[in-house]
Amino acid sequence: MTQYSAEQTRHMANAIRALSMDAVQKANSGHPGLPMGAADVATVLFTQFLKFDAQDPHWPDRDRFILSAGHGSMLLYSLLHLTGYADMTLEQIKAFRQMGAKTAGHPEFGHANGIETTTGPLGQGIANAVGFAIAERHLNALFGDGLVNHKTYVLAGDGCLMEGISQEAISLAGHLKLRNLIVLWDDNGITIDGKVSMSDSTNQLARFAASGWTVSACDGHNPGEIAACLSAAQHADRPVLIACKTIIGYGAPTKAGTSGSHGSPLGPDEISGARKALGWSHEPFVIPDGLLDAWRKAGSRGAADRAAWAARLAASPKKEEFTRRASGKLPADFDAVIAAYKQELARNPPALATRNASQNALDVINAAVPETIGGSADLTGSNNTRSKELPPLDAHNYAGRYIHYGIREHGMAAAMNGMALHGGVIPYGGAFLVFTDYCRPSIRLSALMQTRVIYVMTHDSIGLGEDGPTHQPVEHLAALRVIPNLAVYRPCDAVETAECWQLALKDGCRPSVLALTRQKLKPARLAYSEENLCAKGAYEIAPSGGKAEVVIFASGSEVEIAIAAKALLDQAGKPARVVSVPSMENFERQDTAYKAKVLGSEKTRIAIEAGVRTGWDRFIGADGTFIGMTGFGASGPAEQLYAHFGITAAAVVKAAD
């Protein structure tokens, strides 16, 4: 471990402070306070403890650094530039918060190397970090210390710890004894409104300790104390919180320690005074060569470790499997496995709830794809997410593949984002569809970051029955479908369920929601199709014998109703065809000719879904008939609810008159 004197550390930290306050000032927008206050902590971490190599940002066994307090983004950008990440140039620093720059207002995953996750919504970073740590422990159990042995460090602020998701995250991490997770709390006592004491009096050390963490505290401007706490954390047997007492806006003559330095440029006079107080005489954006050399040396100190790791990988009998998982590629025979399963379903079409069909598909998938890690937010028996012989992942067995997340829907979703971002695993987790409201901020970030996370959301309509309107999702499908880059799948039977799982697993750049029924459904796909028809998003599942006068569009459980209505209409001399719409998003990706063919030109156009109308006018037009929900549900048996709300084959026939 490289040793730096307190004086050297102070000078190196001042480079962060200078770049941060100058970039914020030039942009006339941003948050200088956190980077200036946490600069000493970050300097000790990056120069003495963090295992990384700036020349190989994607080294799988690197330590991860997550800036949970994403508003302090200039701290991270400064560190990436100073340590020598090739794409974080001085020009990027100068272009902070400008159009097209990698230096966005909050760190955005994919914009620049070294940004491990998108942070901004407070609490997400620390919750993502739990997922990173889970993935590391799991892969360590499978591949050993020689290939996987790294830590996840988090810099979190008061806001991260106030957000409710933080409790879900830290209690799960403590329960799992994730000793590879270290949180550095920037304990500056300031939020936008002013002192934290105005709104909160939580003893955070006691809170984390009660959640099963090791806790310690230090002066966040004393390099020796910071290093001592970090050194002790290396040997902990559980996750670690280090409370680093800092002064926000450190060095600013009148705004240090106040909310005035939190979210606004300091101004020319304050910056001039800060330069004098810090002993920083250099012009804006100028880092003297000797200081920059010291930082670049810190950025390359992991090169030897990386080279040694590469040699171990090359000699490992597990190299091929490790490399495949790290690349995100599925096993070569995955499509063949799904094809064989679909052939089996065609031979014996089952009548199942799609949640049960999902579990059957998972029995096949989890045997064929060893990197999947499943779970549920305390609804395993309802979500049917645990397939045969899938052992639990817990503090006694990190090699397990099923996580009991407890009643922590939001924490589960955020942790799955972290697992996907870490790489080497494919996470999926279950809850009721109505509880996507609890998960929504994390689902949105899944879509924004293009992570392969699969949300298994069951009890997808009034069909869940007696639990009543609080648990019956009405607007949730529509609300999810408006999130960009999110695939929402609502399969109608076992075959469509298998196809939707196949699509979700193969889609490496988009999260997926599988909306699944509680109630049993008749099989609709009775013949084997080599093609994955759900990939089209919408397709004709029941064609008309002649020229159709009526077209019926439906998804999920309502496809059964549509097919029954078609039979009645055909008998009445009104030929009809049925289009299954498992994914509106996939349908919009098809070419114009295909979409026109599926939509057709029938004057009588009907859509059926046990939810609100939003989104269906794309298929039926503003003048088409929608059979579904216009308000909330009710408590009662499913079949009675469908009749009560008029979602029936008879209602379709009447609408076609």
Image (cartoon, grey):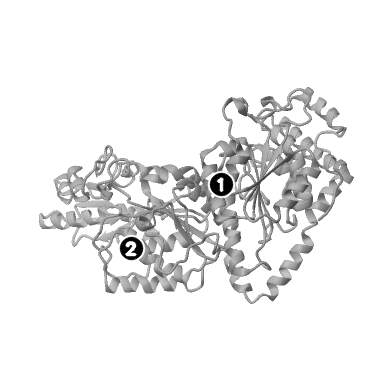
Most distant residue in the left direction: 572
Q: For the residues marked 2 and 1, what is the alpha-carbon distance in whole angstroms?
A: 37 Å
For residue 140, side relative to residue 16 (left or right): left
Residue 383 is situated, as x and y percent measured from the top left of the image, at: 37, 56
Q: In the rendered image of this protein, does residue 518 appear above or below residue 225?
A: below
Q: Which mark is residue 126?
A: none
Q: Which label's residue is closer to the chain start, 2 or 1? A: 1
- Residue at image coords 32%, 51%: 459
Mark 1 secondary-structure assignment? loop
Residue 102 is situated, as x and y percent measured from the top left of the image, at: 66, 44
- Residue at image coords 46%, 71%: 368
Q: What amino acid does circle 2 point to?
A: Ala
Mark 1 sits on what residue?
211
Q: Quadrant of residue 570?
A: bottom left
Residue 91 is situated, as x and y percent measured from the top left of the image, at: 75, 42
Crowdedness of circle 2 by 10 Å Cα count: few (<14), some, many (20+)?
many
Q: Foreground residue, 434 or 292?
A: 434
- Residue at image coords 28%, 70%: 527
Q: Foreground residue, 104 or 308?
A: 308
Q: What amino acid does circle 1 point to?
A: Ser
Q: Quadrant of residue 311?
A: bottom right
Q: In the rendered image of this protein, does residue 257 appear above or below residue 151?
A: above
Mark 2 sits on what residue?
357
Residue 607 is situated, as x and y percent measured from the top left of the image, at: 26, 47
Crowdedness of circle 1 by 10 Å Cα count: few (<14), some, many (20+)?
some
Residue 399 in view of the camera: yes
For residue 264, side relative to residue 539 (left or right): right
Q: How many marks?
A: 2
Mark 2 secondary-structure assignment? helix
Residue 327 in view of the camera: no
For residue 620, side relative to residue 244 (left or right): left
